[in-house]
Image (cartoon, grey):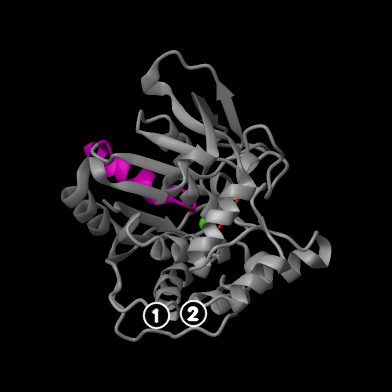
Amino acid sequence: MAIPLLIDTDMGVDDAVAVAWALASGNEARIVGMTSVEGNVSLAQATANIARWLAGLGVAEMPPIGQGLSQTGRDMPMASHVFGDDGLGGVDLPDPTDFHPTDFRSIYGQAIEAHGRDLTILAIGPLTNLAALLDETPELLARVGRIVVMGGAVWCKGNITPHAEFNFYRDPAAAAAVLSAGLPVSVVPLDVTCQVLLDESHLAHLARSRAARGELLARLIRYPLVREADGGCGQFQVHDATALGVILRPAHFLRAAMGLDVVTEGSEAGASRPRVAKDKSRQVNVVISVNAADLLEDMLESLCDEKFVV
Ligand code: RIB
Ligand code: CA
């Protein structure tokens, strides 16, 4: 049976790769709701990007879509320097006119009411929406089967400060609240996601694959790839698709149960601090390793609709 999936996203390029893979996964996962959160781009842009990307992929029937929250307070960076001003590499996408997002709370409420323990939440942006739900209706998230979070830099250097990964940095208090609430959370940190890399050879396969989405994905990913090539190594880290991989291909990962505290203020805000937690209710599952080659092979096979050897 397809896993009912609610995706909470700040809709940058790697979020879009994850959404494309979820849609391409056939009977493995079914998107039952999507909610936007500010992060890579503004809240309005993240919300619009959900509709633009689904329309670009030719999704005939949009899943229920809700607009979430922005982070207030600290003047924080977004990610236009990586993903472009629109967050999706400036790729030419439709702008659906018949698109009327509701409030994120109704998307969560409906999905949890309909699917309960069968529901998996994939949180691939700052955890602002989930923390708000925890605060307003604490019993709601407790009914969910699983929450998979892309975030944190546990033993590696951060990607927005030396201490912090972007999603946790943008809302450290939200991350701290969600990870300490005793919820069934799996954290997929930068330590692991930075190992799953796409390069030009993968884009070439995508571009010539028989899947219509392939050419669009190649154009989408080329933007950050070239940008990273400006100063990087011409490879693109698919953070959010790796987090989806934990749901679709769990055998490619190892995980360990531990406490994970998040620093909420000061120069190390957003830093993740692992600790031994004997009390299971204070633990989260932290993904500690990935078989990147096998994960990439499976991801690209789904995206290309054809056998793929990396
Ligand atoms: O640090 C990487 C994470 O921050 C990814 O989810 C990326 O899309 C941004 O949201
Ligand atoms: Ca993201």
Please tell me whether residue 307 is drawn above or below residue 123 in the rendered image.
below
Give the residue pinned by disc 2.
212
Coordinates of residue 69 in the picture (x, y in percent): 40, 58
**Does 154 appear in magenta?**
no
Nearest the viewer among 163 and 124 is 124
Which quadrant of the frame does ligand 1 lie within? Answer: bottom right
Query: Which SS class for mark 2?
Result: helix
Q: For the magenta stretch, what is the residue range?
A: 123-142
Work out whether residue 248 can be spotted: yes
Give the residue pinned by disc 1.
58
**Amino acid at circle 1:** Gly
**Amino acid at circle 2:** Ala
Task: Return the disc, 1 or 2, that comes first in the chain's sequence.
Answer: 1
Q: Which mark is residue 256?
A: none
Left or right: 16 in relation to 66: right
Is disc 1 in contact with disc 2, using a CB cutoff of under 8 Å? yes
Image quadrant where one finds the C terminus: bottom right
